[in-house]
C-alpha cells in the first residue's frame, strides 16, 4: 500500500464517522492547545522582560529595602522589618560611588489627581530625582523633564502620563496647566510617551514630581529605591555594585560578616528570577497538558480497537484479495496518526487564538514560538502512532478465514 493511498483511506474512514472522530480528537486538541497557549504566553512574557531590560539598560542596578519578588509572605514580613532606605543614603551613594555613572532615587504611592471638574483615582504619584526619567528611559514628547533646580527647590512641577492628558485634560495642551495631586497643586512641565497596557494595567496613569516635593507631602518615613548606572561591561558593573554595596553597608552600620540589610539587584538578576518563575509556570502547565495528551491517546486507541472490531469483515476481504500484513498495519497506523495530526492542527490554531485572546483582554504579552507549533504537531502525531500500534497489530494479525466469517 502506498503512503498516499493509506492517507486517502484514513480520511475516508474518519469522514464516515464524523461525530466519533470529533469526540475522539478532543483530548488531543485540548492538550496541544494548552501547550501552544502556555508556550506563547511564556515566550511573550520573556520577550517583554527582555525588552524592558534592554530599554532600561543592562548596566542599571538598584538598591531597595526588599527584592522585587518574594517567594512567601514570611519572606515579605522579614524584609519589611528592615530599616528604610533614606534620601541621605541615596546622596551618600551619589557622592561617593566613583564607578557609578549616574545615580537616581525613586519613591511612589497612589493617589487622586484633579484638574478642574475632572479627576482620576489610583494614579501612581512618583517622586523622582532629576536623573530618574533619563535612567528609566522615560521619553518626554512635550515640554521638558525635571532638572536639578526643580529637585533642589522642591518645585511644584510635574510630568504626566498620557492617561492624565486624555482623561483629565481631554486633549488640551498640558504644558502650563495646573493639576492637584492629593490636594497639592503642581504645574505640568512635560508629557511622557504613551506606553500602553501590561497585564491589563495601564502604564500611563502616573504623575512624576521632584522627590523633594514628594517627601514634603508624604513624609520621609517610607523607603526609597536607588537606581545606579554603571559603565559598559561586566567589570564596570561589578566594580560599581561593589562600591555601592560598601557605601550602603557603612551608612546602615551593617557589621562585618552580617548579611546586607538591603537588596541589590541587577537587570540580569531580575531577568533570571522572572525566567525561573515563567519556567516553573510553563513546566506545570505543560505537565498537565501531557496528561491530557495521554488521555487523548488512550481514547484514540480505544476508538481504533472499536474500528478494528467493526471492520473485521473488511479486513478479511482485503487479506483474501492479497493485502499483506504490512499493508493493514500501515492502514490503521495512518488512520490513528491522521486523526491525531488533525487534532494537533486544530489544537495549534486554538492555542494561538486563546493566547492572543488573553493578550488582548488582559494586556498580557504573547509571542508565538514557531518551534512550539512544529513541536505540537510532532507530539500529536507521535501520540497517534504510539497509541495506534496495538490496534493496528491486532488488525494485521487477524486470520482472514476467521475475519470473513464475521457477521459485522
Image (cartoon, rainbow, N blue to C red):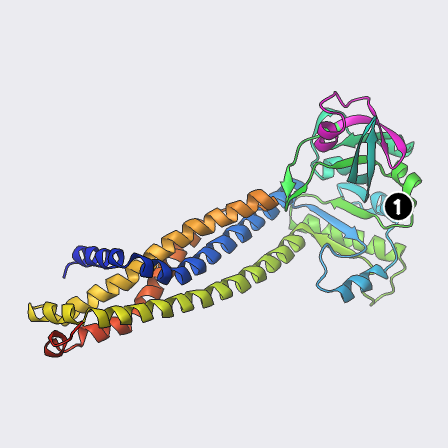
Q: Residue at the location (92% across, 39% down)?
A: 217
Residue 374 placement: quadrant: bottom left
Left or right, 302 with reference to 73: left
**Badge count:** 1
Magenta range is 162-190
Q: Residue 285 placed where, x, y %?
A: 53, 62
Q: Residue at the location (73% across, 30% down)?
A: 167
Question: Which residue position holds label 1?
Answer: 87
Mark 1 burial class by Cα count in 10 Å: few <14, some 14-19, many 20+: some
Q: Residue 290 placed where, x, y %?
A: 45, 65
| Relative height, residue 24 to residue 89 (above, below) | below
Asked if the magenta segment contains residue 186, the reply would be yes
Residue 361 placement: quadrant: top right
| Relative height, residue 292 to residue 368 (above, below) | below
Q: Residue 259 placed where, x, y %?
A: 80, 65
Tell me the SS state at disc 1. Answer: helix
| Relative height, residue 224 to residue 144 (above, below) | below
Q: In which quadrant of the rendered image does the C terminus lie? A: bottom left
Q: Residue at the location (82% across, 21% down)?
A: 176
Amino acid at each position: 500500500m502506498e503512503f498516499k493511498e493509506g492517507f486517502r483511506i484514513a480520511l475516508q474512514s474518519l469522514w464516515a464517522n464524523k461525530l466519533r472522530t470529533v469526540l475522539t480528537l478532543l483530548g488531543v486538541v485540548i492538550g496541544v492547545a494548552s501547550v501552544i497557549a502556555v508556550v506563547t504566553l511564556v515566550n511573550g512574557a520573556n520577550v517583554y522582560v527582555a525588552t524592558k531590560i534592554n530599554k532600561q539598560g543592562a548596566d542599571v542596578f538598584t538598591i531597595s529595602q526588599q527584592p522585587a519578588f518574594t517567594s512567601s509572605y514570611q519572606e515579605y514580613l522579614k524584609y519589611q522589618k528592615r530599616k528604610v532606605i533614606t534620601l541621605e543614603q541615596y546622596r551618600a551613594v551619589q557622592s561617593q560611588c566613583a564607578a557609578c555613572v549616574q545615580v537616581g532615587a525613586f519613591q511612589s504611592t497612589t493617589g487622586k489627581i484633579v484638574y478642574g471638574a475632572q479627576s482620576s483615582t489610583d494614579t501612581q504619584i512618583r517622586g523622582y530625582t532629576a536623573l530618574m526619567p533619563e535612567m528609566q528611559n522615560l521619553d518626554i514628547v512635550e515640554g521638558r523633564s525635571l532638572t536639578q533646580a526643580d529637585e533642589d527647590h522642591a518645585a511644584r512641577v510635574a510630568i504626566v502620563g498620557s492617561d492624565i492628558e486624555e482623561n483629565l485634560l481631554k486633549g488640551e495642551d498640558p504644558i502650563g496647566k495646573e493639576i492637584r495631586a492629593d490636594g497639592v497643586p503642581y504645574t505640568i512641565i512635560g508629557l511622557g510617551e504613551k506606553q500602553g497596557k501590561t497585564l491589563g494595567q495601564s502604564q500611563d496613569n502616573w504623575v512624576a514630581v521632584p522627590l523633594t516635593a514628594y517627601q514634603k507631602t508624604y513624609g520621609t518615613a517610607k523607603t526609597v529605591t536607588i537606581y545606579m548606572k554603571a559603565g559598559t561591561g561586566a567589570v564596570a558593573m561589578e566594580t560599581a555594585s561593589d562600591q555601592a554595596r560598601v557605601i550602603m553597608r557603612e551608612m546602615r552600620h551593617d557589621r562585618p560578616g552580617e548579611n546586607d540589610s538591603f537588596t541589590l539587584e541587577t537587570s540580569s538578576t531580575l531577568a533570571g528570577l522572572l525566567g525561573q518563575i515563567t519556567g516553573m509556570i510553563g513546566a506545570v502547565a505543560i505537565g498537565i497538558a501531557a496528561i491530557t495528551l495521554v488521555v487523548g491517546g488512550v481514547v484514540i486507541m480505544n476508538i481504533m480497537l472499536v474500528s478494528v472490531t467493526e471492520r473485521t469483515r473488511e479486513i478479511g476481504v482485503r487479506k483474501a484479495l492479497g493485502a499483506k500484513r504490512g499493508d493493514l498495519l500501515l492502514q490503521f497506523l495512518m488512520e490513528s496518526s491522521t486523526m491525531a495530526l488533525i487534532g494537533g492542527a486544530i489544537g495549534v490554531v486554538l492555542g494561538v487564538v486563546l493566547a492572543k485572546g488573553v493578550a488582548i483582554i488582559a494586556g498580557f504579552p504573547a509571542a508565538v514560538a514557531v518551534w512550539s507549533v512544529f513541536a505540537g504537531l510532532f507530539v500529536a502525531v507521535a501520540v497517534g502512532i504510539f497509541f495506534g500500534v496495538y490496534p493496528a497489530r491486532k488488525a494485521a494479525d487477524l486470520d482472514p478465514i476467521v475475519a470473513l466469517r464475521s457477521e459485522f
